[in-house]
Amino acid sequence: MAIYSLLQNSLQGRDRFLPPTTPSKRAEVYYRRALADFIRTMVNRITTALSKKNLTDAVAISDDDYINTLIEVLASIAGERIEEKAKILATRFVDKIHYQNKTQFTRNFQNAFGVDLTSIIERETLADTLALAIDRNVELITSIKNDFINDIGSNVFTNYKKGFRHGGLINEIRERGNVSYSRAKLIARDQTAKINADFEEERNKKLGFDIYKWKGTGDARERDSHRVLNNMLCKYSDPTVYSDDEGKTWKKRSSIKAFIGKCGEDYQCRCLAIPYIKF
């Protein structure tokens, strides 16, 4: 690998850990708000249709009328293709993470070794990683819509069979929207960490660096399977092993019931990978 050889010649004997790249809070906030707006639009469409029916029908409206209106609106939302809009949103989100990751990575490397990797990083595209992240989030955005519709159907129609009355229908729709908001918040946080970890891995691998130190959060929410890896050396090339003797020997993670995978890969994982630059 030409880049690795160049760095090896200039940085021989200067082994050290680099600060980890941290997930972009700005990207997470952007994504969370965008997903919330997406959900809010669906909630408003449904509640507006139900409210208009109440205002425009001169005769008494039955519960069946309200349910039929709800079915019509849900069918309309379900039939709309959102892949193009979802891709635009996902692309903006992923690009924000990519920009911060690239900026942090080059700055950390220059601070540690006095070497500016900007020109190298610009040439080293992460096209496959970018594309996978965008596709994954298009699927997640689509699933938010589908899950919202299914959630309404499941709860409203179950309650309807139990003697539901239309007076509480709008409140029920809003409550289902709040459930979707909560899920969107978790998705934004989880995907920000995952994508940042993916970029971190790709940049290190392209530069020939395979080893990193696992940095856990150390708080009460940290999973035991992650806590046991804290400060251990790990390999991108083999996520089933760890080292507790500075890489002299490698042991199976299963022996300490540790998580099999990289930092940020597990759901809602907040652990970070500290690259170990060793020649």
Image (cartoon, rainbow, N blue to C red):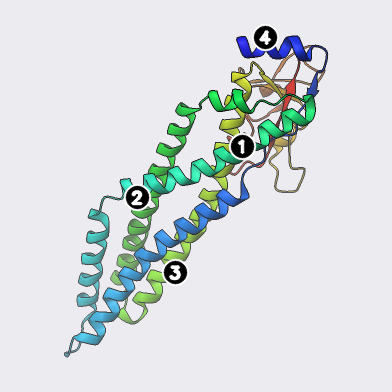
Judged left or right of residue 276, residue 102 is left
Quote the CA–CA distance across marks 2 and 4: 43 Å
Residue at coordinates 74% horizontally, 29% vertically from top-left?
110
Tags 1 and 3 in contact by the CB under 8 Å rule?
no
Task: Answer with mark 2 or mark 3, whichever residue precedes in sequence.
Answer: 2
- The residue that disc 4 covers is 5
Residue at coordinates 22% horizontally, 60% vertically from top-left?
76
Instruction: Identify the mark at residue 101; answer none if there is no mark.
Output: 1
Amino acid type assigned to the residue bearing label 1 in the image: Asn
Task: Answer with mark 3 or mark 4, whichever residue precedes in sequence.
Answer: 4
- The residue that disc 2 covers is 85
Q: Is residue 191 above or below residue 75?
A: above
Quote the CA–CA distance across marks 4 and 1: 24 Å
Packing grade of label 3 (10 A; few <14, some 14-19, many >=20) is some
Q: Is residue 116 above or below residue 96?
A: above
Estimate the x, y position of residue 237 in percent, counting from the top left.
61, 17
Quote the CA–CA distance across marks 2 and 3: 25 Å
Residue at coordinates 59% horizontally, 44% vertically from top-left?
268
Estimate the x, y position of residue 246 in percent, counting from the top left.
81, 18
Report the mark closest to the observer, 4 or 1.
4
Between residues 162 and 91, which one lies in front from this camera angle? 91
Amino acid type assigned to the residue bearing label 2 in the image: Lys
The secondary structure type at the circle numbered 1 is: helix
Quote the CA–CA distance across marks 3 and 4: 58 Å
Task: Answer with mark 1 or mark 3, whichever residue precedes in sequence.
Answer: 1
Between residues 197 and 118, which one lies in front from this camera angle? 118
Instruction: Identify the mark at residue 175; answer none if there is no mark.
Output: 3
Amino acid type assigned to the residue bearing label 3 in the image: Glu
Amino acid type assigned to the residue bearing label 4 in the image: Ser
Report the mark closest to the observer, 2 or 4.
4
